Image: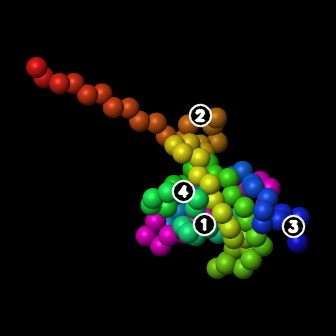
Amino acid sequence: MSDTRPEEVLAGHVLSWHSEEGWGVLFSEALPDQAWAHFSAIQTEGFRELTAGQLVSFSAEEAEQDEYRWRAVRVWPEADVRHPANGNDGPGYSSELDISFDS
């Protein structure tokens, strides 16, 4: 059994997210295993969705959910920040937009 309490806030990132089903998997080095998360646990306004690689803070409880031993109780997404999938220190994605107008 872990010493992690549901009120403890952990730093982590989203391993995978299934938008069509409204759930995904979170990872934190503070937990011995991955945590299952439901969209209803996301603490944000509007449409609640996460993206694989996104940095999050979350609280979790030990509970059997599908094949996962941990369930996220509350999840706070860090806006527009992604965990690098390739292990580098750089951003996980980037984009650029150039607009020109003909006069």
The quadrant where residue 75 appears: bottom right
Majority secondary structure in the magenta region: loop
Callout 3 secondary element: loop
Give the magenta-colored segment's residue range: 19-31
Give the Cα distance between marks 1 and 2: 28 Å
Residue 59 location (% of width, % of height): 72, 61
Image check: 102 left or right of 60?
left
| Front of the two marks 1 and 3 | 1
Q: Which mark is residue 90?
A: 2
Q: How far separated are the C-alphas under marks 4 and 1?
A: 9 Å
Inter-mark Cα distance, 2 to 3:
32 Å
Q: Please provide percent x and percent y for residue 51.
A: 51, 55
**Between marks 2 and 3 in the image, the one whose residue lies nearer the viewer:** 3
- Secondary structure under tag 1 reads helix
The crowd level at tag 4 (other Cα within 10 Å; few <14, some 14-19, many 20+) is few
Residue depicted at x 78% and y 73%: 62
Q: Badge 4 is on which residue?
A: 44
**Amino acid type at mark 2:** Gly
Looking at the rendered structure, the kind of residue marked 3 is Ser
Does the segment drawn in magenta span residue 71?
A: no
Local SS, label 4: loop
Determine crowd level at label 2: few under 14, some 14-19, many 20+ residues with C-alpha closer than 10 A: few
In the picture of the structure, the residue carrying the numbered disc 3 is: 2
Kindly identify which numbered label has been placed on residue 94: none
> In this orientation, which residue lies closer to the viewer: 3 or 48?
48
Q: Is residue 20 magenta?
A: yes
Q: Is residue 49 above or below residue 67?
A: above
